[in-house]
Amino acid sequence: MTANSGTQVTVGVSGTGGGFKKFCAGEIDIANASRPIRNSEIEACKAKGVEYVTVEIAKDALTVVVNKENTWLQNITTAELKKLWEPEAERRITRWNEVNSSWPNRRIALYGPGSDSGTFDFFTAVIVGREDYSLHSAG
């Protein structure tokens, strides 16, 4: 028997933004994040008297994956990813050949993390050019 045998740990599922919201509200004691805390979140913590320490453990890496049945997409540029993910693409870019004319005239089905996710923030910042500038959240 260990010294903390009566301890229970609950692991919740939320994005970075959702985690910071709960943390700064004093609802949870620890949160992991895939981005630094924002100024608005710092202010929310201050308003609730929540003090914190940031401990950087590692840097994230993102991978773009493609369904195994998609045999024509061997590589994709950041410009092509932007064309798929920026808000202007919604209901305008719906087929692969609209991104790259050498790709087939087949329907695109995208999936990505929710907008409260640090992964969403990072991906849209790097690919689209602005953290909050994509309409493609969880699909």
Image (tube, rainbow, N blue to C red):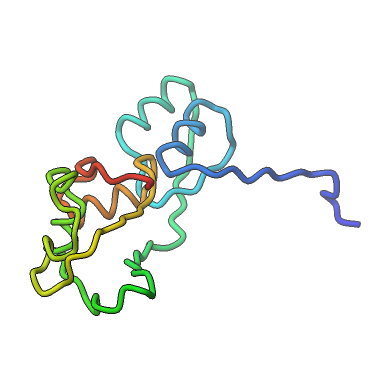
Observer-nearest of 25 and 83 = 83
Q: Residue furthest top?
A: 47
Of the pair 130 and 33, the residue shown nearer to us? 130
Q: Tell me if 109 is positioned left or right of 48 in this view.
A: left
Which residue does the image show at 12% across and 44% down from the upper left?
Answer: 88
Numbered circles on residues, count: 0
Side of 132 relative to 92 (left or right): right
* Residue at the outermost right position: 1
Q: Which residue occupies 76% across, 43% down?
A: 8
Residue 25, percent from left and from top: 50, 25
> Is 127 situated left or right of 20 in this image?
left
Q: Camera-side residue: 32 or 129? A: 129
Q: Residue furthest front?
A: 105
Quadrant hosting residue 17? top left
Figure quadrant of residue 76: bottom left
**80 versus 69 height, above or below:** above
Image quadrant containing the N terminus: bottom right
- The residue sitting at 37% across, 69% down in the picture is 67
The location of residue 35, given as percent across then percent down, is 36, 49
In the rendering, at what x and y percent does residue 42 appear? Answer: 37, 32
Q: Name the spot of residue 16 as percent of width and height, x first.
A: 42, 44
| Quadrant of res 111 | bottom left
Relative horizontal placement of residue 95, taking residue 50 as reference (left or right) = left
47 vs 138: above or below? above
4 vs 20: above or below: below
